[in-house]
Amino acid sequence: MLTDAAAHLYWTTGRTWPAHDVRALSLAVLNMEVPFTPPVLIPLVAALTTGAAAVVARSRGRGGRPASLVTLAVGCGVLLRGAAGLVWAFGIGADTGMPFYWLNLFLYTPACLVMPAAVVAVQAGDPATTVFGGRLMPALVFGRPRPEPAGTRGFTSL
């Protein structure tokens, strides 16, 4: 989310990379023409940054109910975007010859379908535990020591 916020913050400067102009950028990112101006982009940057901060706070056991609710909203939002992306992937409402179609198919939708799993782990209270049987993120990312395996307290291996 912070990467997305950074991209939108960059676009508030009037630059359009990776597109050659605002129209091409708008069509690639949103599949429609929308102004990429500070009054449109700054609230989006604020929302994305707030969402990311809430998820980080929740993952560290901080922020209480507000962080939990915002984290839940982030999860629901990206899940809805992922569902819409699946519709567009089938060519409904998206021209398969446009950059948006391919960006949606290989970047936007996969990211939006993976993020809810991370939100579930964060909401469960231990983001360092398993999702689908594998480690989601190292415990060190969240500043928590790894627990000792059961029955090994006080013992060392040689």
Image: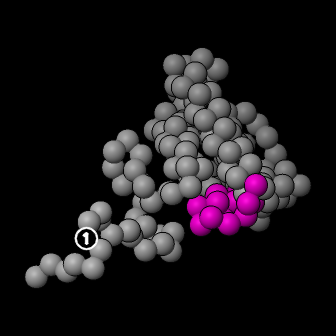
Horizontally, residue 145 falls left or right of residue 124, namely left
Residue 123 shows up from this direction: yes
Residue 12 found in image quarter: bottom right
Magenta region, residue range: 48-65
Please give left or right for residue 127 compared with residue 25 in the image.
left
Residue at 73% x, 64% y is 63
The location of residue 41, given as percent across then percent down, is: 80, 54
Dot 1 alpha-carbon crowd within 10 angstroms: few under 14, some 14 to 19, many 20 or more: few
Is 127 placed above or below 100 here?
below
Q: What residue is rendered at 76% in x and 65% in y?
A: 13
- Whether residue 95 is in magenta: the answer is no
Question: Which residue is situated farthest in the right direction here?
Answer: 39
SS assignment at label 1: loop
Q: Give residue 134's position: percent from left, percent from top.
A: 33, 49
Q: Quadrant of residue 26?
A: top right
Q: Residue 55 in magenta?
A: yes
- Magenta region's main secondary structure? helix
Looking at the rendered structure, the number of numbered marks drawn on it comes to 1
Residue beneath the point at 15% across and 78% down: 157
Name which residue type carries label 1: Thr
Outermost residue, left side: 158
Q: Quadrant of the N terminus?
A: bottom right
- Residue 125 percent across, percent down from the top left: 56, 55
The residue under label 1 is 152
The residue positioned 40% from the left and 65% from the top of the image is 138
Image quadrant containing the C terminus: bottom left
Residue 84 location, quadrant = top right
Is residue 95 visible in the rendered structure shown here? no
